[in-house]
Image (cartoon, rainbow, N blue to C red):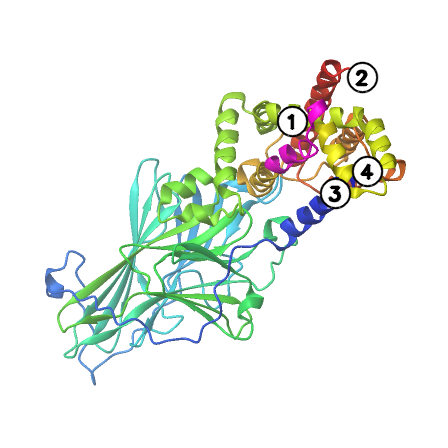
Amino acid sequence: MEKRAFIAVGLSIAVFYLFSMFFAPDRQKTATPVPQSTTSVESTAPAKNQQAQAPQNIAPPAGQATVVTVPQKDIKVDTELYTALFSNRGASLKSLTLKKYREENKVTSKNVTLGNDADPNINSFSTRGAGFNLPDGTLFTADSPDIAIQKGGTRQLTFNYISGQGYTVRKVYTFISGDYGIKLETQVFNNSSAPLVGAIQHVMTYPAEPKVKDNRFDTAGSYLFSDNSLQSNKIKDVATASKRFEKTILWSGFADKYFLNAILADKDSIASVELKKNSAGFFESIVSSPQFTVNPGQSTTITHRLFVGPKDIDILKAQGNSLVQSLDLGWFTVIAKPLLYSLKFFNGYVGNYGIAIIIITIILKAFFFPLTHKSYKSMKGMQKIQPEMAKLREKYKDDRDAMNKAVMELYREHKVNPMGGCLPMVVQIPVFFALYKSLMFSIELRHAPFFFWVTDLADKDPYYVTPVIMGITMFVQQKMTPSQMDPMQQKMMLALPVVFTFMFLSFPSGLVLYWLVNNVLTIGQQMYINKLVKD
């Protein structure tokens, strides 16, 4: 039994490393691109009767088209949460600076800016036509200069493109104060003499390798929610062939550990998403609408919603469309999310995520107390009968069946269970991994201070004080735990605190704090049990 327990501990360490290194949600296999969906979206009302009417100065008929030179221009949109810089090239988002988040945990550090590291030739949400002539980099005309949105206010930014082929494309961004979500309506007006058949594509790009080496980019890549599951891809997954997704796509975007840029479907407005490595070496996501047919004198409107902001569980959930699934908490998400909500709840009362972690640790310890109490009592009982078991092994060394029968009788006589010490620890493994993911990937802990030198619970302890103390408490716990191992195995087990100490040196201090408090509580529990179970 003790050899199996020793092996189980070693396997636990291996599983812990493998879990953090290789775990990822199932990925969809590369598929050969298939023809675009032919779902028709057709408006029956003439363009002049549309609520968002096409401009009156529609381009002249074919053969009389004039070329209008539109200068490239940037428009700034300022809200209480962010400052966004839009470009009329592709009617796109050039960058968005978050006012509540800094790159580093310093007052002097600059704010986090998203989208500024995209392909310089293709800004975020740049629009192109599929089936009609609207190429990348098309210059639109903006309807207003810089915009400042007051608290509680709502404003729109409109871009228009009048082609020389008798159609007009209009993009309308709607901003709401206090919301990271942005509504995007793309309208196509057909003033030609022939039906216009095609689709609208919004393009996003992302760097192949982040310019800044930071653990924020550990999980950076493409994420989308399709066919009721999260699909994640790195640029290496599309280096040789593109990937295409077409089944019930709710959203698609690029994300790192803490922040997300995404486009969300509105009433099935995303028909497909193609991921590829473009000619400039950037990760590219092409989001296509269903195919539409716009008859002469008519128009159609395709609506999406955009999200550019933090992966805060409450903010993501408020956006709908299962966007909260972008917060990938692993196999034990069903446990991890309640733990994260609990952390936020307690922080709301105590105003310190470190204290909230301590409270959660105490609650979990109390919840599992009956199991761990039974485990330690069983281990203590097993330790007491070791001399008798040694005698039985010697007595029946030539008769294995008789020895097993005598050992089982000894277990019944002393009311001990050899598996009683292992099962409670196995039951707690899902909770540990769930809490590990919650603390590891929670933006709530990013730059959240505890006390004294621990100023960022999402970063390692700068002076390695907590990991060292954690290792000491783990050593004390090992010494107090009843054991039936031989001396050599016991020495090897006592080396585990050293291994864990070095392993935890680079872990987030919030996770180290949890483990440290858990060890202290376990020591207290073991002292209590030792008094109950006298030698």
| Residue nearer the viewer, 529 or 141 | 529
Residue topped by disc 3: 4
Q: Is residue 214 visible?
A: no
Sequence order check, earlier mark of 1 and 3: 3
Q: Which residue is mark 1?
A: 372
What's the amino acid at mark 1? Thr
Specify which label sits upstream in the sequence, 2 or 1: 1
How far is disc 3 from disc 4 in space, using C-alphas?
A: 13 Å
Asked if residue 188 shows in the view, the reply is yes
Count neighbours of disc 2 (C-alpha within 10 A) and say few if under 14, some if 14 to 19, many if 20 or more: few
> Which residue lies under the disc numbered 4?
493
Q: Which residues are magenta?
A: 412-428
**Pointer 2: what residue?**
535
Under circle 4, the secondary element is: helix
Disc 2/disc 3 C-alpha distance (Å): 25 Å
Crowding at label 3, few (<14), some or many (≥20) Cα neighbours within 10 Å?
A: few
